[in-house]
Amino acid sequence: MSSRPIASPSGESSAPFIVCENVRKFYGAFEALKGVSLSAARGEVVCIIGPSGSGKSTLLRTLNGLESFDDGRIRIGDVDLPGTHRQILEVRREVGMVFQSFNLFPHMTVRRNVALAPVRSRGLSWVEANGRAERLLRRVGIVDQIDKYPGQLSGGQQQRVAIARALAVEPQVLLFDEPTSSLDPEMVQEVLQVMRELAHTGITMLVATHEMGFAREVADRVGFMDGGTLLHIAPPREFFDHRADKRLSAFLSKIL
Amino acid sequence: MVSDKGIARRGTSGLAAGAAFARSLPIIIGLGLVAWLAWGVNWSFVSNLDFTVIYKYRVALFEGLVNTVWITFASLLLGLILAIIFALLANVRYAPLRWIIVFYVEVLRDVPLVVALFWIHFALPVVTGISTSVFESGFIAMALQSSAYLTDAVRAGVQAIPKGQWDAADALGFTTARKWLDIILPQAFRIIIPPLANIALGYFKASSVLALLSVGELTTVATRISNYTFKPIETFTFVAFVYLVLGYSLSWLTFRLENLFETKRI
């Protein structure tokens, strides 16, 4: 009988907030996720890189129930997905999401975009929620656009509003699904800067991205996905310098 | 629309004189036709027109107009409520429910309003034992039939909303009811304003067939006046004018509404 390890990754003392084990997902005959295992502790920032179609988005979308999965186990906090409808709603309030194409509500002002979810799913009054929207929009640097409609903002500004909107329900986790991929180059940095500041606040972040600089600088761990498999995951220094996997080093040499 | 005309004008201005003649040819033919028709008309009827009949029956005509507007508005409102419910149900996974809705829409779309009207008024009491007044029958026929057309319009509007909007609402933890009320239906409504206005205008005019049951709307009243006074030209000219003014107002209102949303959205 060997002594129990003090802080093993799966040990009780540092129970990860997100646990995926052997998650598989099919679209018809196509296997989008071929048994992915990944866990993230509270406050951890995990970046996932990989070519398009490798399953990064699908993986993130299974974590808040936007996509179903066919096999394996996903546990968020103390809910096993897919739970009841009520449990999924609870999970979604703890796990916010930022999309590649922003997906702001075009028929509402910026203020209302941010204030709506706290009122509808956290039971805040409009006065409280509007105050919170104003604080969050100040934090992402667009409080002066608060009464405009999303269509009047630039892509970078819209994505920062989307981040504020996701933060407004005070989630434990934020999922970023290629948040800078549809932005013009000059707007990428303003969004990455907001994400960088967020990473220091202790919120758990899972980021699918092509921004290697960001991953190296901000992530606690970086994972590489290809063909529906998480091939390699390691702290950034080890990840980028050792290039343990052949496909990873081919991918990195293509984009670096 | 404005820009289309602009392009057409710019295109023709550069053309040669032959094209200018070709362009004026339809105008010449048109004027000729009008002259020929005017020649054939027996203009002496004009001196016999007596529009005082309109003034004399103004109260009855006004009541008829109120009935027309009321039955159109009320039946379309009920039709729209039914349509939203059907469009929601069409999204349910349970297939037999979808088939029932498709069947309902198809049946009501293919049966003429007059036939539906007579069926509801004469056959429904026999089947159900509940008899309805002519006004109620007209209201039910128009509400049911418009609900079929509106179901299609609402469903198309809902389908036009990008998947990202559904994702965003889901990801924020909205309940199904909240998702529809706050995100999907308000956006769908903007998309369906033009078809909605078309359907409304169609039923505003179609309400005149209710006169076949003497429902008491504008055309019923006009028919009665014309039969009683033997002045069909005055009566129906006036009534046509009333339909025109109200129909045009509706189009104008729609245009303004669309513009309002357009400027807000950019």
Image (spheres, coloured by chain):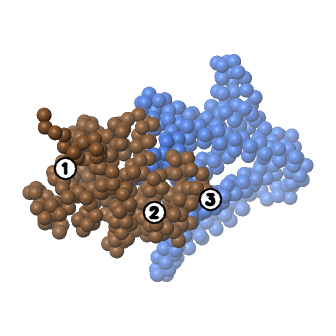
Chain colours: A brown, B blue
Circle 2: residue type = Val
The answer to whether any part of residue B149 appears in the image is no
Q: Which residue is mark 1?
A: A230
Circle 1: residue type = Leu
Q: Is residue A194 left or right of residue A113?
A: left
Q: Is residue B142 left or right of residue A174?
A: right
Residue in view at x 38 percent, y 35 percent: A83
Asked which quadrant contains residue B63, the reply is: top right
**Looking at the picture, how far across and down is residue B123, in whole percent?**
66, 22
Chain containing mark 2: A
The answer to whether any part of residue B30 appears in the image is yes
Q: Which residue is mark 3?
A: B257
Circle 3: residue type = Leu
**Looking at the picture, how far across and down is residue A235, in whole percent?**
20, 58
Q: CA distance from mark 2 to mark 1?
A: 31 Å
**Looking at the picture, how far across and down is residue A66, in whole percent?**
37, 45
Choose the circle earlier in sequence order: 2 or 1: 2
Q: CA distance from mark 1 to mark 3?
A: 52 Å
Q: Nearer the viewer, mark 1 or mark 3?
A: 1
Q: Which residue is mark 2?
A: A161
Residue in view at x 68 percent, y 60 percent: B37
Query: Helix, strand, or loop for circle 1?
Result: strand
Residue in view at x 60 percent, y 42 percent: B80
Give the vertical position of A253 relative to A13 (above or below): below
- Are labels 2 and 1 on one chain? yes
Crowd around label 1: few <14 · some 14–19 · many ≥20 (10 Å): many
Query: Helix, strand, or loop for circle 3?
Result: helix
Chain containing mark 3: B
**Looking at the picture, how far across and down is residue A79, in whole percent?**
36, 38
Q: Is residue A30 left or right of residue B40?
A: left
Q: Are marks 1 and 3 in contact (CB under 8 Å)?
A: no
Give the vertical position of B195 relative to A100 (above or below): above
